[in-house]
Amino acid sequence: MPDKAIFLDRDDTIIEDTGYINSAEQVKLVPAVAQALVELRKMGYKLIVISNQSGIARGLITEQALAQIHERLKQLLAEQNAYLDRIYYCPYHPDGAIQKYRKDSDWRKPKPGMLLAASKEMQIDLRNSWMIGNDYRDVAAGKAADCRTILIKSHTKPPVKKPTDPDPDFEVINLREAVNVVKRELTRKPVSQQSAPPPTIQAESPQQTAPEVKPEQPPVQQMPEDKIQIEQPQAVETSNPPEITANKTEQLLEDIKLLLKSHHRNAQFSEFSAMKLVAGILQVLVAFCLVVAIWYKLSPTGKDDAVFTAIGFAMVFQLIALTLYVMHKDL
Ligand SMILES: [Mg+2]
């Protein structure tokens, strides 16, 4: 039975992008990314990095330095019990300065070569897998490989969309939210669609591209076997693409739910008002006046005038309080 995978872009998805990272010291994990990867693995996904590294073709970094960067990445993740299954990268670029790497490659995103190679080498069911990244070329590569796609749309570095770029299945603000999307989709996919036939691209693309891609494949970094912790997929797992309409309906219902909650909170808050506060204080004064009236009445030296005055004040305060209550209700 083929595995399912989460294909992950590297820069600004797993590690913070500071331009061309060319040394291990520059590797810094995106906040909370390790926990997100742990959760994705618990859901039964293999975790595979898919990264364009044209810096190699441009002469900005060597493959050896890149290997050290990826070792550092794995080390930082392992410190938080998170592990990657493989890292695929494309060192090529058609305008590269290094002759060896100067060419157009099927591996370079937005082309899906790396995903197709991973599917073939690691027996990945692409239709049951996701591509997550912060750029539309990640989305394009995922779509071309027939994966579902999630675009991480950061406010600080929003991706630029070209007219030809495909829309992602989902947009999120970080990997944490992407995990929630994947989790939600796992539990809501209808069972009736589990036996949907595989798409044409999955059957044909690896075979078509393999003769060209295979000789070009750069070294693949793989985690040691003993570090790979793969759990079985959940029983509710299916192999279907998302139903876009159903997704929108689900999202709409979620929005309505949040709106109702918000209104409920506002209603609770509006229960409090200055009028009610003053009315409450007046009620306390009414009680005080009545106590004073009783005290004067029971006192041997008490005077009836004082009693009537206290009761009079109590009545006036009570009247004002009632007026305030009525006015508040009418507002
Ligand atoms: Mg990126």
Image (cartoon, rainbow, N blue to C red):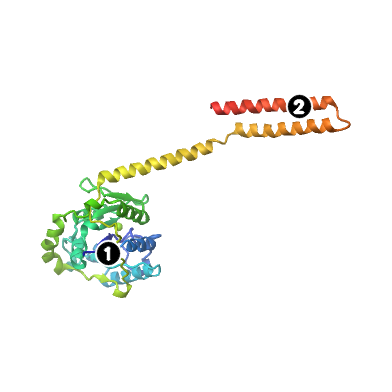
Q: What residue appears at the point 33 percent right and 44 percent down from the top-left corner? A: 251
Side of 36 relative to 264 (left or right): left
**Which one is nearer the viewer's eye here, 10 or 94?**
10
Q: What residue appears at the point 31 percent right and 69 percent down from the top-left corner? A: 70
Residue 27 seen by the camera: yes
Q: What residue appears at the point 82 percent right and 27 percent down from the top-left corner? A: 306
Give coordinates of residue 312: x percent, y percent: 75, 25
Question: What residue type is disc 2 on?
Answer: Ile
- Mark 1 Cα-neighbour bin, 10 Å: few <14, some 14–19, many ≥20: many
Q: In the figure, 301 relative to 102: above or below?
A: above
- Mark 2 Cα-neighbour bin, 10 Å: few <14, some 14–19, many ≥20: many
Give coordinates of residue 201: x percent, y percent: 14, 56
**Which one is nearer the viewer's eye here, 229 or 82?**
229
Farthest residue in the right direction?
A: 301
Q: Could you give the CA–CA distance between mark 1 and mark 2, rounded to whole angstroms?
A: 82 Å
- Return the residue at label 2: 311
Please identify the quarter of the rendering in which residue 8 is found: bottom left
Question: What residue type is disc 1 on?
Answer: Ile
Q: Earlier in the sequence, mark 1 or mark 2?
A: 1
Q: Secondary structure at mark 1?
A: strand
**Quarter of the render that holds ligand 1:** bottom left
Q: Secondary structure at mark 2?
A: helix
Q: Is ligand 1 less than 8 Å from the beta carbon at label 2?
A: no
Give coordinates of residue 37: x percent, y percent: 35, 62
Please identify the quarter of the rendering in which residue 31 is found: bottom left
Which numbered tag is attached to residue 111?
none
- Quadrant where the N terminus is found in the figure: bottom left
Which numbered tag is attached to residue 48?
1
**Which one is nearer the viewer's eye here, 281 or 85?**
281
Residue 96 seen by the camera: no
Q: In the figure, 146 relative to 324: above or below?
A: below
Side of 311 relative to 150 (left or right): right
